[in-house]
Amino acid sequence: MKKHNFSAGPCILPQEVLLKASEAVQDFNGMGLSLIEISHRSKEFVEVMEKARALALELLDLKDKGYVALFLQGGASMEFIRVAYNLLETKAGYLNTGTWSNNAIKEAKLFGEVVEVASSKNEGYNHIPKMFGVPNDLDYLHITSNNTIYGTQMKTFPKVNIPLVCDMSSDIFSRKIDFSQFDLIYAGAQKNMGPAGTELVVVKEDILGKVSRKIPSILDYKVQIEKESMYNTPAVFPIYTTMLTLQWLKDLGGVSVIEELNNKKAQLLYSEIDLNPMFNGYAKKEDRSTMNATFTLADEKLKDTFDAMWKEAGVSGISGHRSIGGYRASMYNALSLDSVGVLVDVMSEMERKG
């Protein structure tokens, strides 16, 4: 039976990408060697790294605009530290919209003063809070564009006169926005880009080199730029698979094309959540994520019945995060509209059974 993969991450990837990646593990480019056993400094892999970095800038429309794309290691959690190490001199602002922004705040406090410009924590992170009067004396403002656990997403972004940093781990490459409004973007690969093991950092070079502290080389963005993401041995397989995924997206027509599909998927599922009395949405409607739809059963006594139904239909990975329970359907780029239709059919059948 076909599985419909709604996992929040590591998550679904295009089938053609998985096929090409698996072939490369056996024999990369006809070399008679596996991708994961060749030198990362070989011409063949250097070309992979260069192409992956170039595709990232191209798809974000940031080519020749003063930005550099890096593929590093440690996931977005490492960037919580690396951002503060490189940018926080005295005081930084953070918008607290969920678990991951809360974790970023915790790490930043090790390096300087942190101002929470707004927070939705007291409401269970069920919406994006409004920001009023962001101070101009901050070293930067950090935001999280999408929240996988709670199913919220920023639809607009603040206009500020300080560097704007954005954690886009769970919605990068999913919608067309002006990415040049951000000075630094980072994202773990395991949502819309590739397998776990690498993260993308896109940084405007002119914001670097302004803190007084000494930065360890591996955490220094300037060193990573100088070494072209090769300061240490890169995550070869995740970067190659990410490159394939970015090429797949480009061949589809780019971010604007995938955005149309993502909107259709989200509209289909949210319409069912709103019209079906058996379910309740978690996030406020105006802040609902197109990537992660969170919902609960109106009657928790029906949980065993519903769980059996979606599993029988081949649906996988919709159990909610342990911190809030309920259900979470992650609809990343590679998930088909047909898969969302299968889940919606199960929910409709649940209503018919009463």
Image (tube, rainbow, N blue to C red):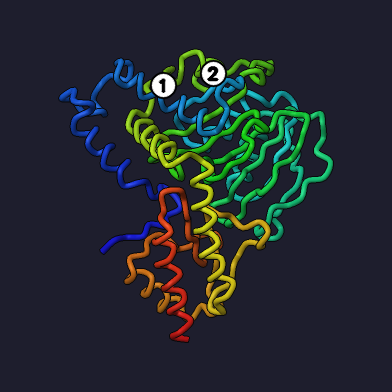
Looking at numbered disc 2 in the image, what kind of residue is underneath it?
Pro
Q: Position of residue 90 (x, y in %)?
A: 74, 26
* Residue under numbered circle 2: 216
Query: In terms of sequence position, does the residue under pointer 2 or pointer 1 come before the other?
Result: 1
Residue 90: mark: none
**Residue beneath the point at 69% across and 15% down:** 212
Crowdedness near tag 1: few (<14), some (14–19) or many (≥20) residues, C-alpha within 10 Å: some
| Front residue of 109 and 139 | 139
Q: Is residue 342 above or below residue 232?
A: below
User: Which residue is depicted at the point 49% across and 59% down?
Assistant: 265
Indicate whether 23 appears above or below 330.
Answer: above
Q: Position of residue 178 (x, y in %)?
A: 64, 36
Secondary structure of the residue carrying tag 2 is loop
Task: State the image quarter where residue 171 is shown.
Answer: top right
Which image quadrant for residue 166? top right
* Callout in the foreground (2, 1): 1
Q: Nearer the viewer, residue 124 or 311?
A: 311
